[in-house]
Image (spheres, rainbow, N blue to C red):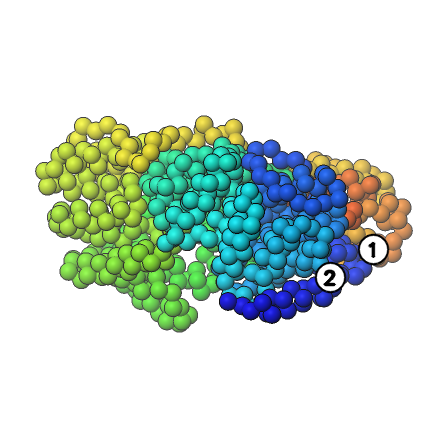
Amino acid sequence: MRSAIAVASAVLALVLSGPLRAGDKPGHSEHGSAFDTGLRQRPWKMAGIGQSHFEITTKVPEVQVWFDQGNTLLHSFWFEEAERSFRWCIKLDPDCAMGYWGLARCGMNWFTSFGPWSNDPEVKRYRDFLMEAVRRKGNVSERERRYIEAWSEAFAPDTQKPGEMLARRLQEISIQWPDDIEAKVLYALFSMRRDGALGAEMVLRDVLAKQPDHPGAHHYRIHNWDGAAPEQGLPSCARYGPVAPNIGHANHMPGHNYSKLGMWHEAAISMDSATRVELSYMNERLALPFETWNFAHNRNYLCYIQEQLGMEQAALAGARSLLAAPRNPTPSDKDGEATFMYGLGALLRGLVKFERWDTILAKDSIPWRDKPEDQVQRAWVETLAYIGQGKLVDAQGRLDDFEALIKKEDIAHPGLKSAVDIAEGLLRAGEGNILEATRLLSSAAETERAARRAGEYENDPPFEAWPVARLLGEVYLNQGEHRLALAAYGEALKAEPNDGFSLSGAARAHAALGNDAEARRCADALAYVWSSADADLRWRHSVDALGLVTRPFAVTPAPERRYQPAQLDALGPNVWAPFAAPKLDCVDENGVQVKLEDLRGKNVLLIFFLGKECVHCMEQLTAVDGRKSDFEKQNTVVLAVSSASPEKNKASAELGTLSARLLSDKDHENARRYTSFDDFEDIELHSTILIDTSGRVHWKRTGGDPFKDVDFLIAELKRMNGTDGKSAE
């Protein structure tokens, strides 16, 4: 435990180090760099998010309303929107210490509580917020001060386990203020662990007895049992979505537990609802997939569940929609392909699971990048594809490539040894060497079992196409070893309850052994799980060929609704597509009105800049102008919008050298519609926006600095036009 002197020193350092100022840089916050990112438009009172109350000290009564909204949003991990509400608290009451503490919690949260403090700039900015809270802690009650000190102690630079520190401090607050529900809820969040789930459950039951619809209590209860005993979270799985229906994550989280219990229909309703709620919000608020932290994860999870329901085409379409989604280059992700990686993983998992070997090997069917990680994945899935096609010599060649790439790149991931065993095992089975095949697959299955026991198996969702035991079952089944096949399928079904592929194999093995009743039981379960499955799946046809009289029957720990996507259409779409651009109504330097609809048939690069006085703006516009011919080749016109009058634009010698059409935005009306105006500080922002020939937004970047990566813009335009040779659609 850290000494009291060390804690005091850390807190004193926070107090004495003055706030970070950004100087006079146009578009930057006067309060410091921490305020230069995040949503910079005023919040609105949100319905359908649940309710929680956290009493704070403030000079402005309205602040309490916005603080409660931010706190409620944090309980559903909606960090971006919570930050917007807390910033409004500070707008109304600049000395609101708890408003700054709320901002700090948006980054100093459960996800960043598992290890030492990170110096990543994307996270470090929240330390600046915390510094401001510490600076003002003398203005609040003792209870509030204890919260601020808990966070400053837990996220001090030398704290190794912030979550454990927070749990201790929140426990102390809960004891001293036993009626503080928020302290108990947060204590449960930060004290969760697989081998101690009962303790958090008891605390959350106490909270729910007093506030039955507390969104945080239901959310954390689901997390608490997710990796331990998911059936214990079912009551909160049923309640969390209805409590906060307009929050994507509130619909998403129950799907975690439903998936692990084999309740695939209910899981699909959960994840599909979440995807639609998130997309509706994104379209309404002009947010792109990379600006909504949970969207790509949620869409990948829905793909996985649709695979389990036999809905191959829907799953693959969802994966390709992620591949087509806009990308956001950052210092930590130069190519901006985090969303792309979710899409690629979902696509490969689906193609392998449904054995679409021709598609895997077809030219340009998968948007492979020239990167080591893609080369490794490609060699592996193409090995499987050649095995599936019976081209064993080609398969051996790609397997050799796979192992050589692993060695060349010096990749030490433990899963790669199992991947080699799986590929080689399937190859040996294809060659007829069943003894060696089963040895290798058994080894891989044991590695997977050990990882599952240790909680180290990635199951959120898995990127593997199957439990290895299912592959072992298929090898045994093909060799007529029906009892061994049943044992393997049984193990696979424990790992993935109600998996249709394993149910199909088990039904065939039982039928071969004359176990007609058991074969029908498996066939009934398959008919239920795959009640909405695509028609051309060989696993179902092979069971139909048994001639069993079956009826769909659910084998689930609780009743569930059947997943019917059309019934969710009222929530919005579940596949990302570019959204309609807001209204653009400006005048050019000659006083001619310019509207977006007048430019249909052309792509538009729309740049909101701060005027010729902004050096960085001029650098951006000059860089764009230098690539005029490249933009013309991509059928793109460049519009540069500022608040300067037409007369001022026309008279400017600096702007007169540019080929971009200069537009005037009176009273920032257009900037506000395009979220290019900071409502917290009443200042203009830099925005760069790509709009397609139909008037839809494909990509944008807004903030304190202009976007100057012209190569990226050209590349995105090529993706929009489908001329990059790598488009996912």
569 shown above or below 412 = above
Q: Where is residue 34 drawn, in percent x and y?
A: 68, 57
Say whether marks 1 and 2 touch (CB < 8 Å): no
Q: SS of the residue at dot 2?
A: loop
Location of residue 31 (image quadrant)? bottom right
Amino acid type for the residue under numbered disc 1: Lys
Residue linked to disc 2: 19
Residue linked to disc 1: 612
Q: Neighbour class for label 2 at 10 Å: few (<14), some, many (≥20)? A: some
Q: SS of the residue at dot 1?
A: loop
Identify the residue at horizontal 12%, vertical 37% (top origin): 515
Along the line of sight, the residue nearer the viewer: 627 or 9: 9
Image side of residue 715 versus residue 415, left or right: right
Image side of residue 17 versus residue 207, left or right: right
Along the line of sight, the residue nearer the viewer: 53 or 360: 53
Image side of residue 74 versus residue 568, left or right: right
Identify the residue at horizontal 39%, vertical 62% (top origin): 376
N-terminal label among 1 and 2? 2
Q: Where is residue 60 drawn, in percent x and y?
A: 75, 41
Q: Is residue 48 visible?
A: yes
Amino acid type for the residue under numbered disc 2: Pro
